[in-house]
Amino acid sequence: MKRRIVTGRNVCKVILLGADSVGKSTLLCRLLTGRFQPLLPRTYGAVFATKTLQTDKRTTLLHIWDTMGEERFRSIIRLYYRDAKAAIICCDVTDSSSFHEAEYWIKELKAYQECQVYICGTKMDLVQYVSQAIVKDLKMFNGDCFLTSSKTGENVTELFQRIADDFTAACPGMFDSRPIIELSEGSAPADGSTRRCCGSDAH
């Protein structure tokens, strides 16, 4: 098992928000492992993971918090808003009710934490074509929009890369000088920072 110690990286806190079962956890798992894992245990509270990306000749470390979507836990989720620089609000393109849920999360962020918002339409593999209604519904949130599929990998890396690029451009000096040990793919992190690939969301 190979290890590499890296220091001096831009650090960006990212929170994943959205209704229960819209695909937040499988989105994160696809990013971290490059694989589709539809049967994940339910997320309780939030699950923490890290992802390192290159941006404009710099290295950006994303601190990603995958939060639970159940309504009864929403007051707890507010604890994770603090210091977030970016928020991914997930909507299931096959479930119109999840778009209404997205409105709630946007209002929450405006009230509790100012950050860059990215709208993520999930489960694109389940629709034959992108309807104008889907595009219109996503764009009404006034955030950068991405249509993704955790099953095929469509636009997953691109979404997180955009977050890293935007953050580096806006906040070039937010460095963390603490050493972080990176392990080769498929091994368990020594510090437990990515214990598992998050909760129960379907793809």
Image (cartoon, rainbow, N blue to C red):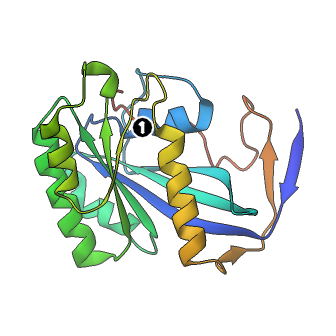
Circle 1 SS class: helix
Residue 176 is left or right of residue 201, and the answer is right
Image quarter of residue 110:
bottom left
**Residue 97 in sight from this viewpoint:** yes
Q: Nearer the viewer, residue 116 or 80?
A: 116
Looking at the picture, how far across and down is residue 41, in whole percent?
Answer: 41, 29
Residue at (54% x, 41% y) in the render: 157
Q: Amino acid at mark 1?
A: Ser
Residue 42 is left or right of residue 155, and the answer is left
The quadrant of the image that shows the N terminus is top right
Looking at the picture, how far across and down is residue 36, in whole percent?
Answer: 49, 22
User: What crowding class fits label 1: few (fewer than 14 Cα within 10 Å), some (14-19), or many (20 or more)?
Assistant: many
> What residue is pinned by disc 1?
25
Q: Nearer the viewer, residue 138 or 36?
A: 138
The quadrant of the image that shows the C terminus is top left
Residue at (54% x, 69% y) in the render: 167
Residue 144, placed above or below residue 178: above
Looking at the picture, how far across and down is residue 73, in whole percent?
Answer: 24, 53
Residue 173 is left or right of residue 105, and the answer is right
* The residue positioned farthest toward the front in the image shown: 132
Residue 98, placed above or below residue 175: above
Looking at the picture, how far across and down is residue 14, in whole percent?
Answer: 47, 60
**Residue 197 in sight from this viewpoint:** no
Residue at (17% x, 32% y) in the render: 131
Q: How many marks?
A: 1
Residue at (66% x, 52% y) in the render: 53
